Amino acid sequence: MSQRFYSTKSPEIFVDVKEAVLRSLPSDNGLYMPEHLEELPAEFWENWREMSFSEMGFHIARQIFRDSVPEEELRRIVKETLSFEVPVVKATANAHVLELFHGPTLAFKDFGARFMARLMCYLTRNDEGLLTVLVATSGDTGGAVASAFHNVEGTRVIILYPKGKVSGLQEKQLTTLGGNITALEIEGTFDDCQRMVKSAFLDREMSERLNLTSANSINISRLVPQSFYYFEAARQFENAPVFVIPSGNFGNLTAGLLAEKMGLKVKHFVAATNANDVVPAYLESGKYEPRESVATISNAMDVGAPSNFARMENLFGGTWEGMISRIRGYAFSDELTRATIGRVMLDTGYMLEPHGAVGWLAAEAWREEEGNRQDETILLETAHPSKFLDVMEEELGEGTIEIPERLACLADREKVAIQMKPDEATFHRWLQSLA
């Protein structure tokens, strides 16, 4: 049976996998969710600890897509996506780090971007015309999408990023490739970029004429490969771990919830944020109050209106009580984040970048609560420290950060970006000019 997808705002209306993945956003401005998401069968759990990562990923993806994608194609897509290591590093007796930055662009976004590029190529294999991929980025998404889709035949990629709010090397990753990649430097925040992207999809006539799709985590297919590494980490522990997730748009945490829905045993989820603490505040009060984002040194989490909150609500039946039973939220300042980078390096020898440092603080806060002291925490470290060179050298000293060659080679490349105001009408006119 093929999988169908519904909108979080219209659960009675269904679309197929091609519509959900390629159109990305329902016309009602909800988010797509799979109609059926059952636990993985007993035979999977009998063998999952012995499977290769790609074989395990295939079974998980098949559980989500069902018969919507032929098995041989899905197996190939997953295998090509998971072509790099995903180590769990023990930092202290109970604190572990899941390193998700060993892919081509040194960020966890490589999982989603590589998977999506291959899935979209399969879904459009018989289509005519150009597929236009829109993406808003607060840092790593843009670079990962640019890398995954660069020179992929039949696609063009348009990346919106907030001016002055991504690191220098992150900016080079998304502005120097050229070819079918175009960068728009928006004079605003990530929330402005995300709003502009969403507005383009809600203009159905333009969306269909330009064949628009999104590579942000509003696209359900982005979350599928992100669920894989929760299984990969958890199978290395005898008891159910606590996952600690540095969180901005909350796609990564939502992927973990999908993993749990498929039967993965997780003791608890911890959402770690910076000053943009909309979700931790909700978990405390039951009131969801999006607001304008604040710039911090952990820029990928600078989101004031996280899109995936709608999916989180949907998974818990819209109840605050359900969500707080599985998720704990913490928020920390830049000052504490900076101090933690140096402290952890001195105490353990492990180098955390700013987002990981926020997660480390949250893991400590969780273990300090009564009854949690012996819990095994797994922190999702989402990017390589070299991507935040200025902050890292300020805290650890110049010359302490080794920049991998695939990032260092970008330093002298010329940035090419189109300047644009954070105005939907201006963006729409620019998009219309592409037709």
Image: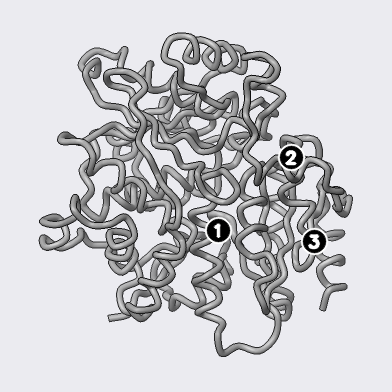
Pointer 1 with pointer 3, Cβ within 8 A: no
| The disc label shown at residue 46, or none | none
Query: 382 or 82: nearer the eye?
Result: 82
- Dot 3 or dot 2: first in sequence order is 3
Residue 36, position as x, y percentages in the image:
29, 67
The residue drawn where x is 20% and y is 58% is 39
Amino acid residing under circle 2:
Thr
Determine which quarter of the picture holds residue 178.
bottom right
- Mark 1, mark 3: which one is toward the viewer? 3
- Dot 2 or dot 1: first in sequence order is 1
**Which residue is denoted by mark 3 in the rendering?**
178
Pointer 3 with pointer 2, Cβ within 8 A: no
User: How far apart, in angstroms, are the residues tagged by discs 3 and 2?
Assistant: 24 Å
The residue drawn where x is 32% and y is 65% is 58
Amino acid residing under circle 3:
Gly
Determine which quarter of the picture holds residue 362.
top left
Query: 316 or 246: nearer the eye?
Result: 246
48 in relation to 91, above or below: below
- Mark 2, mark 1: which one is toward the viewer? 1
83 to the left or right of 412:
left
Name the secondary structure under disc 1: helix
**Which residue is denoted by mark 2 in the rendering?**
189
Determine which quarter of the picture holds residue 426.
bottom right
| The disc label shown at residue 113, or none | 1
Residue 297, position as x, y percentages in the image:
66, 25
For the C terminus, give its image quadrant: bottom right
- Mark 3, mark 2: which one is toward the viewer? 3
